[in-house]
Image: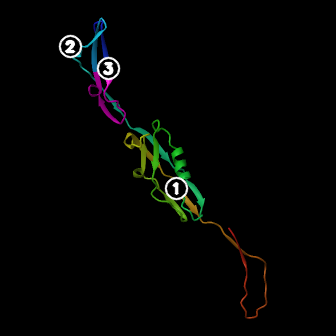
Amino acid sequence: KLPSNETLEITLNNNPINVGEYIAADVVNINIIRDTNGTLEDVTSFYQFYVAGSVNINKKKITITRHDKTIEYNGLPYYNNEIINSIESNITGLANGERLEINLLDNPSKVGSYEGLIQLNEIDILDKDNNSTKSNYSITINPGKITITKKQITVTTFSDSSKTYDGETIYILFNLNK
């Protein structure tokens, strides 16, 4: 127990924030200040300290889910900001102020099925200062499947036509209904 005119001050010299083990003795500063009639004196050197323990910060688990989606072919690449935003809006559990950044492997525009378009190396998590904090997370990806189906087109003649054979070519006008 300290004498009544001495005060123990403990401050952190390194605020642990990222994943890892932090030894208590490495992250704290200890000072003892004596107040003698209003005169403050550092008397830390009069004491011997034993600081025990450690703090572990473990990775936070998050899951990134891209739900299956089927769209009709329109000639345009499927991914755009809307799809990136829909992926990002399905993320919960990011630390306060951090955001997800995704670079997609492919941008499908042809008819077919596409799986695995989101890969771990194409994802980063950034703090408010744009520093990567991805190493603080354990990330599971459910990439979903994108299916682009054939667009249905109907071709019809403008009117029913009939003609008796005369050896001449007939020209027929068609209406394209997309």
Label 3 element class: strand
* Mark linked to residue 10: 3
| Tag shown at residue 121 | none
Give the residue type at disc 1: Lys
> Residue 145 — which label?
1
Q: Around disc 2, counting alpha carbons within 10 Å, would you say few (fewer than 14), some (14 to 19), or many (20 or more)?
A: few
Q: Which tag, 3 or 2, sits closer to the chain's start?
A: 3
Task: Write the residue at 76% across / 92% down.
Answer: 165
Question: Image quadrant of residue 36?
Answer: top left
Circle 3: residue type: Ile
- In this rendering, is residue 39 above or below 76? above
Residue 31 to residue 92: above or below: above
Mark nearest the camera among 2 and 1 is: 2
Give the labeled residue for mark 2: 46
Q: How is the image coloured?
A: rainbow
How far is the residue under mark 2 from the one under mark 1? 68 Å
Q: CA distance from mark 3 to mark 1?
A: 54 Å
Q: Which residues make up the magenta segment?
A: 10-29
Could one spot residue 1 in this view of the protein?
no
Q: Residue 157, image x and y in percent?
A: 74, 77
- Secondary structure beneath dot 1 equals strand
Mark 3 or mark 1: whose residue is earlier in sequence: 3
Gap between marks 3 and 2 measured at Cα? 16 Å
The quadrant in which residue 173 appears is bottom right
Q: Quadrant of the N terminus?
A: top left
